[in-house]
Image: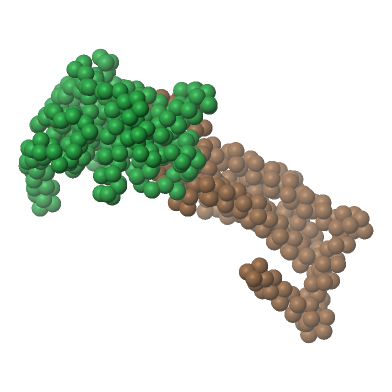
Amino acid sequence: MNVDDAVKAGMASATPGHVPKIIVRNLKKIFVNPETGAEVVAIENLNLTIHDREFVAIVGPSGCGKSTFLYLLAGFEPITSGSIAMDGVDITGPGPDRGIVFQEFVLYPWRTVLRNITLGLEIRKMPRSEAGDRARKWIRLTGLSGFENAYPATLSGGMKQRVAIARALAYDPEVLLLDEPFGALDVQTKNYMIGDLQNLWQEANKTILLVTHSVSEAIRMADRIVVFRARPSCVIQDEKIDVLHPRDPLDPRLIEYQRKITRVLSAEVDKAMRREHEAKG
Amino acid sequence: MRRIRPIISIGLPLLLWEFTSRMGWINNFLFPPPLAIAQAIWLQVGPYGNPPYAVLFHVLRSMVRILAGIGLALAIGCIVGLLIGLTRWGNAIFKPIISIIVPVPTLAWTPVLLLIFGIDDRTTITVVFIAASLTIIYNVVAGAEMLGARVFWVIQSMGASPWQIFYKLIIPGIFPYLITGLKLGIGFAWRALIAAEMLAASSYGLGFMIFDATQYLSMDIIFGGMLLIALSGYLLEHVILGRVEAVTIKRWGVQVER
């Protein structure tokens, strides 16, 4: 069950490259209420460069637009103006080069764990046996061995999220997008998963973007933490976390980073809360 | 122990009926004893019935009509339901039409259909179609609306073609709702069919059998016919569809999670 053992055999050292992978320029996103015509500017003047095989965490106050940003990257929502380009090509819609993991898992309940994971491979028309082998590899790496034929309804939250992660990684997208993946899990499960999956990210060797409201979560996993300001959001802090994996949560360097980032984040959260308060009158 | 309860709750009144009828304590012309009813029906099942094998033909005819109507309702109901639930234009075009048709009791269509088709199987099959397709559409729409954007996003991020999305997501996604719609639809359709068979006074069919028996004051055939109707309906709605429903729900878990 231990992911560590499974990965130690052939762990690729994944040092993030310095080749830009995703370039975001002057991004703006406005939501228009179809009935009232009211406009909400979610994102404005956002500029960000994400490098190949970097693990970037995005933190920000609730409702600031970090999930929106992820959905724009994923191609689920159209951008209002500006550009998002991956490998020089503008993003126009969803595609197999970007995998997604949602907070609410979103597994297909009529499929077993194995078949949920092979979904992306079936779409690619991969022969069944090959798809099965590939899926089994990711089942092992995410610690799901033994649960291949279980249906999602019988799984705990933590297991469901592992399935969702394995599903997103199985078809080998270049970029993995995670939208508050541990948000629906209790603290104990979350802490366990973060520790257990640390080696998974190394093995996956991908560009990873993690959206979270938890700085401690980001500190443990990311190479770089980007702080979004309150709506309309843009980048207000960009911090490289220069600590080797596996990381000890009690490492003083990590604690220092956490303090630094939390200070900036708290100020933004205050601003966002105050604005909501004022809006309510 | 639990199986005995329905036997007792149905059997006891039957026993009472048998006894009071044979004793003449209740009007045994209006209420012939159950055993006599069974005998009369059994006679009609066999070659000495009038016409020979009458009951078999009646049951068969009703069955053919309901299956034909259900088949049509399933095909068209799914298509329309999906169009309403998944496309904006489908919703705009079909929903108003359906909303106007729904309040009309299915049976009220019979006179119109009689005038169009005459005393013909097409009348009764169309009645079945109307009853079943409306129910199926309603449930398929509910199922499609339950899907939500994210299940689509998941499969789109895998680079799925629209056809792949249809048979890997939409079909299995709405399946339990479809089954529920089918189960309810068959129930409504069966009841509407029997009534239509009585109104349309066609030849053969359980509804017709009862209606016809009224002319000859054959109370035993009437009651027997009602029993057959009840049994057939129960078979269709609960035994056959009930099994399919149980298997589907068991696999998905009691709560379908998105």
Question: Vertically, is B252 above or below A16?
Answer: below
The image quadrant of residue A35 is top left
Report which colour depicts chain A: green
Nearest the viewer among B200 and A159 is A159
Residue in the image at 18% along x and 38% along y: A248
On the rendered structure, is A6 left or right of B18? Answer: left
Q: Residue furthest top?
A: A88
Q: What is the drawing colour of chain B?
A: brown
Question: What residue is at 14 percent from the left and 34 percent from the top?
Answer: A228
Q: From the viewer's perspective, is B255 left or right of B131?
A: left
Q: Is residue B194 above or below residue B251?
A: below
Q: Does residue B2 appear anywhere in the picture?
A: yes
Q: Position of residue A150 (x, y in %)?
A: 48, 43
Residue A181 position within the rendered picture, expressed as x and y whole percent measured from the top left: 29, 39
Q: Is residue B38 above or below residue B162?
A: below
Q: Nearer the viewer, residue A168 or B83?
A: A168
Say which quarter of the image contains residue A45. Answer: top left
Residue A174: x and y in percent read 32, 22
Assign the C terminus of chain B to one quadrant of the image. Answer: top left
Report the number of numbered marks.
0
- Decide if residue A93 is in sight here: no
Q: Quadrant of the N terminus of chain B?
A: bottom right
Identified at 52% across, 32% down, the residue is B167
Quarter of the rendering containing residue A59: top left
**Residue sitting nearer the eye, B11 or A133:** A133
